[in-house]
Amino acid sequence: MSNGGNLFETGERKSIPAVLVYARLEDQVLMIHRNASATVTGCEDHHAGRWNGLGGKCEANESALEAARREFLEEAGIDLESDTFNPLGVLQFPNFKAHKNEDWIVFVFSVEITLEQKEKIKISNSEGELHWVPLGELFRLKLWPGDRHFLPLVADQIPFMGTIWYRGAEVERHWVTPLA
């Protein structure tokens, strides 16, 4: 506590709501390789060089589902119906961006893609390139180290929740548990 109050209440810490969407087609998952240069994006990318599910920060007055749908449209170029998004998990990342005093709360979704929808997905955007990755090769990618603790649950479609603490880019500790 600082100044006799909760750090979130005093504004000294921020909690950033965000979403991750893992689109699936059979044994493949759609991932973004965050390889766009800062000159293209206009800012330094905290995720540069890494592979992620699609997603980003929620906007003001936007639900996690609305954010997942919007982010998928922005990054993959197709608008999917809300009922195709399957809520899968919630992750807390305390002090994820320590330099900004930010904790992140991430709502994780999965979505099944049809072959017809796959054909309409754009393969690049301002943040990087999209790739269909076989599930068996997912852990060969340069992921955030903490992703290895929850992605097996995403791959098996098992609901979960957890907390992953980072110190810089390394996992300091983690707690991820299935809900089923």
Image (cartoon, rainbow, N blue to C red):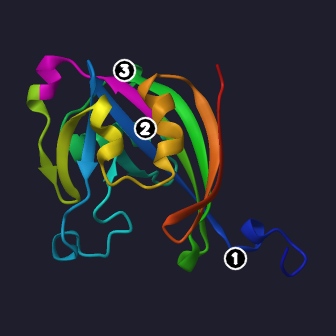
Which three-letter amino acid code belongs to the residue tagged 3? Thr
> Image quadrant of residue 144?
bottom left
Apparent side of residue 14 relative to residue 138 in the rendered image (left or right): right
Which three-letter amino acid code belongs to the residue tagged 2? Glu
Screen quadrant of the N terminus: bottom right
Q: Secondary structure at mark 3?
A: helix
Disc with the residue nearer the chain's start (1 vs 3): 1
Give, as a single range, the part of the protein colored magenta.
109-118
Q: Which residue is mark 3?
A: 84
Apparent side of residue 17 relative to residue 81 in the rendered image (left or right): right
Q: Residues within 10 Å of mark 1 (few under 14, many from 20)?
A: few
Q: Residues within 10 Å of mark 2 (few under 14, many from 20)?
A: some
The answer to whether the residue labelled 2 contacts the one labelled 3, judged by CB atoms less than 8 Å apart, is: no
Q: Secondary structure at mark 1?
A: loop
> Image quadrant of residue 81?
top left
Q: Which residue is mark 1?
A: 12
Q: Secondary structure at mark 2?
A: helix
Query: Residue pushed farthest left?
Result: 119
In the image, residue 13 lies at what x, y percent? 67, 71
Which three-letter amino acid code belongs to the residue tagged 1? Glu
Disc with the residue nearer the chain's start (1 vs 2): 1
The answer to whether the residue labelled 1 contacts the one labelled 2, judged by CB atoms less than 8 Å apart, is: no
Disc with the residue nearer the chain's start (2 vs 3): 2
